[in-house]
Amino acid sequence: QVQLVESGGGLVQTGGSLTLSCKVLGRIYAYRAVGWYRQAPGKEREFVANLQWSGSGAYYGDSVKGRFTISRDNLKDTMYLQMNNLAPNDTAVYYCNTANSLETLGTSGVWGQGTQVTVSS
């Protein structure tokens, strides 16, 4: 059984940076894509970024383009989200997700437990 364990969240000031990690535990050969999503209080879950485990096809939500970078280390079975120039509206619980394809991310597969990111003004 596959599990995702996130880390790296915390409190940061506006303009600061954080790197989130998502460690995959278990056999992931059935999953081809990984992604990050976030949910702020009172709002719907929002797509942040995704890519194939092979490293190709990185896509970003409009609100994070140019500031966030998604990456993966296959040897460590770990996905990362580098977040720069953070703003208060980036405050949310961030979740990682892995699924069979980019098309099924966000609606299927395995989810992490979430990690809180808080950006102070």
Image (spheres, rainbow, N blue to C red):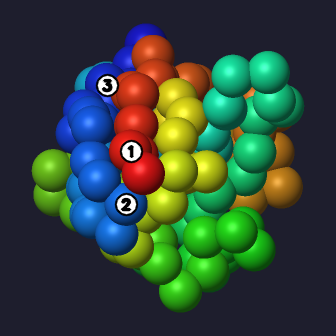
Q: Could you give the CA–CA distance between mark 1 and mark 2, rounded to whole angstroms? A: 6 Å
Tell me what residue is drawn at x 40 percent, y 37 percent.
Answer: 117
**Residue toward you, 37 or 116:** 116
Q: Nearer the viewer, mark 3 or mark 1?
A: 1
Identity of the residue furthest to the left in this view: 76
**Residue 29: image x %, image y %?**
45, 43
N-term mark: 3 or 1: 3
- Residue type at mark 1: give it: Ser
Residue denoted by label 3:
5
Q: Amino acid at mark 3?
A: Val
Position of 69 relative to 109 (above/below): below
Question: Amino acid type of disc 2?
Answer: Thr
The residue mark sitting in front, 2 or 3, is: 2
Q: Are marks 2 and 3 in contact (CB under 8 Å)?
A: no
Q: Position of residue 2 (x, y in %)?
A: 42, 21
Q: Secondary structure at mark 1?
A: strand
Cα distance between the residues tagged 3 and 1: 25 Å
Q: x%, y% of residue 116?
A: 40, 28
- Residue 86 picture quarter: bottom left
